[in-house]
Image (tube, helix red, strand yellow):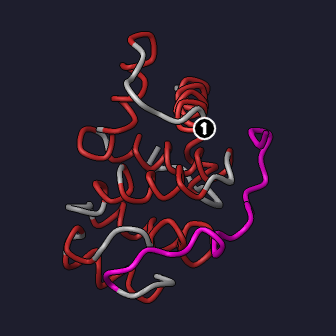
Amino acid sequence: MADKSFSNELGRALARTDADELVRQIDIYIEYKRLGAGDWPDDIADDLEEILYSGINDPEKAMAYVMIAAARTDDPSFLGFMGCGPLEDVRSEPSTELLERIVAEARKSGRFRWLLSNPFKVAIDEQAWDAIAPFRITGPHEEPTDESLPPRNYESNILN
């Protein structure tokens, strides 16, 4: 997909051949969190683990999960988890190309800037921190408030 041009990261995520599966998995995780979390039911454990570890195992997939989640829910707790989980993991050792895409998305989207503002500085690669620091809406060791979550700004047919 690197050879294609996309207007934003959500467009890139939705162009994936597995986009329907990623949407299904994000919806499962959103519902699981909405119901109060707790122990993972066996029937969804694989889906939840795939999202949770995607930033380590497959940064491209992690970005897709983050963008789909940002377009599918207004739950600041869940989105904070996505910012401090998969998105944080992606920024621990990002490729130059991925870091450039993260910065480009941050220029376009207040919601994405909010997601970038969740992890603390110590969790982020120094080069990645320097690239995203101008876009963070909080200091290096504070998370954004729930009330400061910007509205969704992604136009897509996947919005609820």
Tell me the residue that label 1 is attached to.
34
Q: Position of residue 106 (x, y in %)?
A: 53, 74
Vertical position of residue 6 compared to residue 34: above or below: below
The quadrant holding residue 84 is bottom left
Dot 1, how many residues are within 10 Å of its Cα: few (below 14), some (14-19), or many (20+)? Answer: few
Which is more toward the observer, 86 or 63? 86
Q: Nearer the viewer, residue 138 or 156?
A: 138
Q: Residue at x 35, y 68 (%)?
A: 119
What percent of the width, then of the height, locates residue 3? 47, 50
- Direction from residue 142 to residue 22 in the image, left or right: right
**Is residue 157 visible to the viewer in this orientation of the structure?**
yes
Q: Is residue 109 visible?
A: no
Q: Name the one closer to the observer, 107 or 148.
A: 148
As displayed, is residue 108 above or below residue 37? below
Q: Secondary structure at mark 1?
A: helix
Task: Identify the residue shown where x is 38% and y is 11%.
Answer: 42
Q: Choose top left, top right, bottom left or bottom right for residue 149.
A: bottom right
Which percent across, then down, holds residue 104?
A: 51, 72
Farthest-out residue, top: 43
Which residue occupies 50% across, 44% down? 64
Estimate the x, y position of residue 5 in percent, counting from the top left.
57, 56
Q: Which residues are magenta?
A: 140-160
Q: How many marks?
A: 1
Residue 156 belongs to magenta span = yes
Please name the residue shown 61% across and 60% down the image.
8
Which quadrant of the figure contains the C terminus? top right
Please, what is the three-letter code of the amino acid marked with disc 1? Answer: Arg
Residue 71 counted in the magenta span: no
Q: Give the prevailing secondary structure in the magenta stretch.
A: loop
